[in-house]
Image: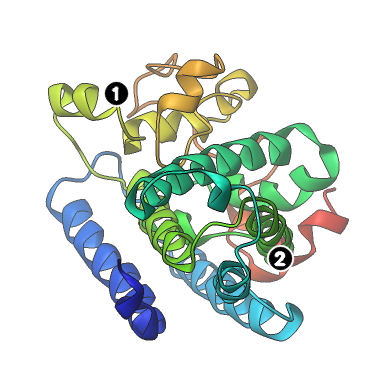
Amino acid sequence: MFDAFLQFEPEMRLAAFGGTLIAILLWEFLATKRPSEWRFERTLTHLLLMIVNSLALRLVMPILAFELALHVEARQMGLLPLIPAPSFVIFFISLIILDLAIYTQHVIFHKIPFFWRFHLVHHADTGFDVTTGYRFHPGEILFSMIYKLALVLLLGPSAVAVLGFEVLLSSASLFTHANAHMPRRLDSLLRWVIVTPDMHRIHHSRQGDEALTNFGFNLSLWDRVFGTYQTDPSLSHAEMDIGSQNISAQRADSFTAMLILPIHKG
């Protein structure tokens, strides 16, 4: 149904990411939620991590999820093609299942110490804004891609579904990390469907128990179903501490320190 868009895959990714980033930066400027944590070194580190992550995927991985999905779809591999339903129904089923899979991955990255060493780079940030949404260690990005490749082989989602989900995931990561005010009533309504910035901010609390809540990326459903949902932080959003214990803002802002963090936590 949407196959004609596949030829514009790079342009669609860039337009979605760039458009979402600009829109949220404007939202943060007009309706800032918490005092800004803007620092030149922090912003530069986030930018460098994003660049290194993009290069790592292209230089290390022999194939990416979207490219594998093209091959899998052509051969009708996986479980999803076995469902007797129209293609648009399978498309939405694919998005829901993939969202659950990313929720599961996120929980794993918190629960298993080896993976947490990499994910800690994301949580070490003492600020919380749209740039946090692309602050990840290259190792986590590579592990995540291997996980997505396995999902594509197992499930057999269409290339359109994989592309749509990856674009949605990228945009959602920017949105859920926005340091921007949203009216409480609107936030409460949206939370019944999607993860909002106020909901996800709790997950970035320095308090260990709060950091183990609100794992969702797109749909808030999974946190409610699996008992990891928390409505509000113990402190107000303005007063809560963001970041990870034992990692200072100076260290968290350092690109080199964050690259070696998985092997040098001390």
- Does residue 50 lie above or below 173 as drawn? below
Disc number placed over residue 192 in the picture, else none: 1
Which residue is found at the position 27% from the left and 63% from the top?
20
Disc number placed over residue 220 in the picture, else none: none
260 sits left or right of 127 in the view: right
Q: For the residue carrying disc 2, how many other residues have a C-alpha within 10 Å: few (<14), some (14-19), or many (20+)?
A: some
* Residue 259 can be seen in this image: yes
- Does residue 168 lie above or below 84 as drawn? below
In the rendered image, which residue does mark 2 sit on? Answer: 142
Residue 77 rendering spot, x and y as whole percentages: 65, 61
Q: For the residue carrying disc 1, how many other residues have a C-alpha within 10 Å: few (<14), some (14-19), or many (20+)?
A: few
140 sits left or right of 266 in the view: left
Front one among 62 and 88: 88
Which residue is found at the position 22% from the left and 52% from the top?
28
Which of the 4 quarters of the picture holds residue 260?
bottom right
Identified by mark 2, the residue type is: Leu
User: Which type of secondary structure does the marked residue at label 1 adopt?
Assistant: loop
Residue 203 rendering spot, x and y as whole percentages: 51, 31
